[in-house]
Amino acid sequence: MRRRNTLLRKVENRISRKTGDVFLTREFRDLAGEDQVLRALRSVVKNGRLVRLGYGVYGRAVQSRLSGEPMLYAPNGFIGAARQALTKLGVKWEPTESERTYNEGASTQIPVNPVVRVKGRFSRQLRYRDMELKVAR
């Protein structure tokens, strides 16, 4: 007997096929209505395949070997995922002055807090656990 291809299964298949680590709800709009997609994404978060970063923004997750909890999977951590989300949302951003001086080798102080300089309007909050993206103008 063949199993039905439910919306949850379609969403999980699309997540596994995509190459990026950040997903927006509008990427799944063609599968079903907005409420159904949000319900399916909520269950994918509950299953541990995604973590919610903000309103309509989700990040790929892997299971932690130590705690068994889902944890954000992105090459540069939360700041990398937040930058991918900003790019997908169409927000123009650039690194802050302190990060730029560190990358150029002019400073030895490593920027700890995730901060980006945003050009234009951006009022969303992106956060993961206790980290929150700070927006400088």
Image (cartoon, rainbow, N blue to C red):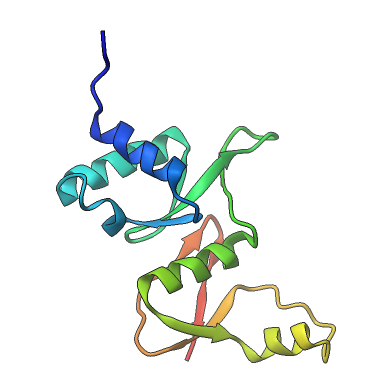
Please name the residue shown 44% across and 72% down the image: 86
Does 134 appear above or below 13?
Answer: below
Q: Nearer the viewer, residue 103 or 113?
A: 103
Q: Nearer the viewer, residue 131 or 28?
A: 28
Q: Quadrant of the N terminus?
A: top left
Q: Nearer the viewer, residue 27 or 131?
A: 27
Residue 113 image offset from top left, x and y in percent: 64, 73
Residue 78 image offset from top left, x and y in percent: 58, 62
Question: Position of 112 compared to 94: left or right?
Answer: right
Q: Nearer the viewer, residue 12 or 73?
A: 12
Please name the residue shown 20% across and 51% down the image: 30
| Location of residue 88 by image quarter | bottom left
The single residue placed furthest to the left in the displayed view is 33
Question: Position of 112 compared to 95: left or right?
Answer: right
Please name the residue shown 51% across and 57% down the image: 128
Does 20 appear above or below 90?
Answer: above
Does 134 appear above or below 11?
Answer: below
Question: Position of 40 compared to 77: left or right?
Answer: left
Counting labels gives: 0
| Location of residue 107 by image quarter | bottom right
Residue 92 image offset from top left, x and y in percent: 44, 84
Residue 87 image offset from top left, x and y in percent: 44, 73
| Location of residue 8 by image quarter | top left
Please name the residue shown 50% across and 52% down the image: 19
